[in-house]
Amino acid sequence: PTPPHPITPITCSFSCSSILRKLRTMLSLAATAPLNLAEELRGHEPEERFILSWGSNSHRQCFTEEAAPVVPSPRLAPCRRPMRSLAAGWESSLLIDSMGSLWGGGCNRGQCLSEESSDEQLTLTRLDLAELDGVPFEAVQLGRDHTLAVLEGGRAVISWGPSNEFGQIGHGLPYRSRVRPGVVHLSGVTVKQVACGENHSLVLTVHGEVYAFGCNLHGALGSGRRDAQEQAEKVGSNHLRAMPIRGIAAGAQSSMALSIG
């Protein structure tokens, strides 16, 4: 079917874009927040949704059934499950369904989408990683070689990826090798939002504190230094201490934070 015109906010990666289009209701979400429809849908009847994507499809990250290297215009993805959140990364894309399960497609390097498949490229499939089985998530973000996923209720951040060269995963050793899903050590804080740069990560707590880890060659961690951080550390500049942060964003090698009032 051809979906009508209302569009829920989008997510952009380094090479592809995705839209979650939904029927009947137009939602207004903060531009700095990860796309998450769970709160808005509570108490409402399920609504039909469509996933649209376009751009580079070198690893099937646009979820197309055919192996086209480029999707030049928005195209419906073959997905009929009710999805509530989505993220587009360097060479892969991820979705969260209404039950909090993770789905994805694209590059399967290091078998970081599915351990059951040795294929380097996957079409849309439920993530098959033992540590994620039965774990409900509410938001997810992707960097070049790492993934951050927020547990329901912001209880923790789970991260993994095919490389942890700069410590961007937040746990495990900083090597160019696969790191399995594990908890980022954040001293028990409740998480509001995560953001991924190319090789660095940001975490925002419900109290407006920002944590950062990973590559710091260009100062993206805000530590005042240029060395990488393998563990999450609070960004403690005078500006951030003086005001609570409401939203965060990460570019390839830069970071931003939004404070309101």
Image: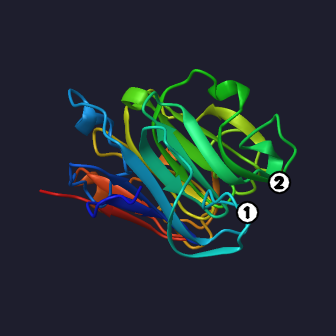
Q: Amino acid at mark 2?
A: Glu
The N terminus sits in image quarter: bottom left
Residue 181 vs residue 148: left or right? right
Residue furthest front in the image = 1
Task: Answer with the quarter of the image where residue 256 lies.
Answer: bottom left
Residue furthest bottom in the image = 72
The residue that mark 2 highlights is: 120
* Cα gap from disc 2 to disc 1, whole angstroms: 8 Å
Q: Which mark is residue 127?
A: none
| Vertical relation: 228 (above or below) 217 | above
Task: Answer with the quarter of the image where residue 239 lies.
Answer: bottom left
Residue toward you, 220 or 182: 182
Q: Earlier in the sequence, mark 2 or mark 1?
A: 1
The residue that mark 1 highlights is: 59
**Crowding at mark 2 (Cα within 10 Å: few <14, some 14-19, many 20+):** some
Task: Answer with the quarter of the image where residue 179 lies.
Answer: top right
